[in-house]
């Protein structure tokens, strides 16, 4: 259907009552509701005009995370994705989006590729899988992330599962991070935090401070 700014939007609804919304522009999931509560966050000043990336939900970072030789976080988050597959498995909707190289992407990153993004909505879970295939005749390297914005109350938010990880604390100087090791079982956020964790476990637990454990 039609979303904000007249951009194409897909609504996924499971037979268990959960719901998700995603925009083909940027391949961006903007909402994930279990019951009536949205577990994702979209910034109030987010722009839906097909010109700037959508600030919120689950934006893509590809083929570059952060700053570098091309624009911040690459081009996948402000490119139009297409639907290549959809299914319903026991009441759980599954959809796969695709992004391929274009003159726009090649002006920044001169490679042929295919990105497939599979989204599965279940009763209490939203699963995302990004698969990159090199369709070129030359090798390439890339960095990527699914840059999730969760709804949270920072005063009550905490993360469990990072104990023992090597850390790069980028506060107060982002250009000279301080190396360390996380000693806490539960990481809380009493003030400004800008910290990178290396070698994190596959499963982490976010208490969003709003009554949900994700």
Image (tube, rainbow, N blue to C red):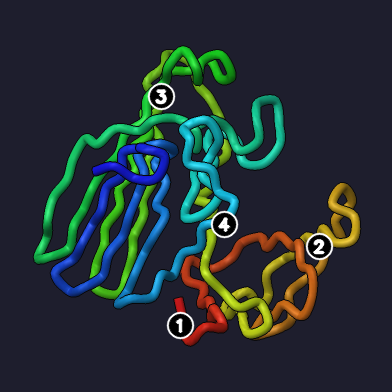
| Mark toward the start of the polypeptide (2 vs 4) | 4
Q: Residues within 10 Å of mark 4 (few under 14, many from 20)?
A: few
The residue indicated by pointer 4 is: 44
| Whether residue 134 is situated above or below residue 161 in the rendered picture | above
Residue lying at 71% horizontally and 31% vertically, measured from the top left = 68
| Mark toward the start of the polypeptide (4 vs 3) | 4
| Whether residue 29 is situated above or below residue 139 in the rendered picture | below
- Identify the element where label 1 is drawn: loop
| Whether residue 55 is situated above or below residue 82 in the rendered picture | below
- Identify the element where label 3 is drawn: strand
| Mark toward the start of the polypeptide (3 vs 1) | 3
The residue indicated by pointer 1 is: 212
Q: Position of residue 1 (x, y in %)?
A: 24, 43
From this viewpoint, which residue is outermost toward the left?
A: 90
Judged left or right of residue 26, residue 123 is left
The residue indicated by pointer 3 is: 113
Circle nearer the viewer, 2 or 4: 4
Residue 71: name its quadrant.
Answer: top right
Residue lying at 36% horizontally and 44% vertically, measured from the top left = 23
Circle nearer the viewer, 4 or 1: 4
Residue 160: assigned label: none
Q: Residues within 10 Å of mark 2 (few under 14, many from 20)?
A: some
């Amino acid at each position: 259907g039609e979303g904000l700014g007249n951009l194409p939007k897909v609504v996924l609804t499971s037979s268990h009552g959960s719901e998700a919304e995603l925009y083909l522009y940027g391949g961006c999931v903007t909402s994930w509701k279990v019951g009536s509560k949205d577990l994702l966050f979209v910034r109030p000043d987010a722009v839906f005009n097909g010109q700037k990336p959508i600030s919120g939900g689950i934006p893509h970072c590809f083929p570059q995370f952060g700053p570098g030789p091309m624009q911040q976080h690459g081009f996948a988050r402000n490119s139009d994705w297409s639907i290549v597959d959809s299914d319903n498995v026991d009441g759980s909707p599954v959809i796969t989006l695709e992004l391929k190289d274009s003159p726009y992407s090649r002006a920044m990153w001169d490679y042929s590729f295919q990105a497939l993004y599979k989204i599965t909505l279940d009763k209490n879970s939203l699963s995302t899988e990004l698969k990159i295939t090199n369709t070129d005749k030359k090798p390439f390297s890339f960095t990527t992330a699914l840059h999730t914005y969760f709804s949270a109350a920072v005063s009550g938010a905490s993360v469990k599962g990072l104990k023992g990880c090597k850390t790069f604390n980028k506060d107060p100087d982002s250009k000279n991070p301080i190396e360390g090791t996380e000693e806490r079982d539960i990481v809380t956020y009493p003030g400004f935090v800008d910290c990178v964790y290396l070698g994190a476990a596959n499963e982490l637990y976010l208490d969003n401070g709003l009554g949900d454990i994700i």
